[in-house]
């Protein structure tokens, strides 16, 4: 697998983390009633978002791949 294709799959993984983050925030704010479970799911959501942001930043700033 080429380096460019590997970067693409890693970026898709980061995008999936962002979707998980949106889902967990939605569940945390609108579906859960207990404070502990709301806090736990919100923590997971923000953790997923931070990890996704770091992955995207690494992929973008690593520059173009050589042919």
Image (cartoon, rainbow, N blue to C red):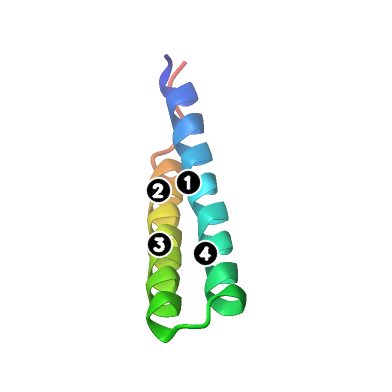
Q: Earlier in the sequence, mark 3 or mark 1?
A: 1
Which corner quadrant of the image does residue 26 belong to?
bottom right
In the image, residue 24 sits, relative to residue 51, either above or below, namely below
In the image, residue 17 sits, relative to residue 21, either above or below, namely above
Gap in Å between the C-alphas at discs 4 and 1? Answer: 15 Å
Residue neighbourhood size for the residue with mark 1, other residues' Cα within 10 Å, grouped as few (<14), some (14–19), many (≥20)? many
Return the mark for residue 55.
2
Q: Earlier in the sequence, mark 1 or mark 2?
A: 1
In the image, residue 30 sits, relative to residue 66, either above or below, namely below
Q: Which residue is labeled 4 in the image? A: 24
Gap in Å between the C-alphas at discs 4 and 2? Answer: 19 Å
On the image, the x and y values in percent for residue 59 come to 43, 42
Q: Earlier in the sequence, mark 3 or mark 4?
A: 4
Could you tell me if the residues under marks 4 and 1 are in contact, i.e. CB atoms within 8 Å? no
Could you tell me if the residues under marks 1 and 2 are in contact, i.e. CB atoms within 8 Å? yes
Q: Which residue is labeled 3 in the image? A: 50
Gap in Å between the C-alphas at discs 1 and 2? Answer: 6 Å
Q: Nearer the viewer, residue 9 or 45?
A: 45
Q: For the N terminus, which image quadrant?
A: top left
Residue in the picture at 45% in, 65% down: 45
Q: Which residue is labeled 1 in the image? A: 14
Residue in the picture at 51% in, 31% down: 8
Which corner quadrant of the image does residue 30 belong to?
bottom right
Helix, strand or loop at mark 4: helix
Which corner quadrant of the image does residue 36 belong to?
bottom left
């Amino acid at each position: 697998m080429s380096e460019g294709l590997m970067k693409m799959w890693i970026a898709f993984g980061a995008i999936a983390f962002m979707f998980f983050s949106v889902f967990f925030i939605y569940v945390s704010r609108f579906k859960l009633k207990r404070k502990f479970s709301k806090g736990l799911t919100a923590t997971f959501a923000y953790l997923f978002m931070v990890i996704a942001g770091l992955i995207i930043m690494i992929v973008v700033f690593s520059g173009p791949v050589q042919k």
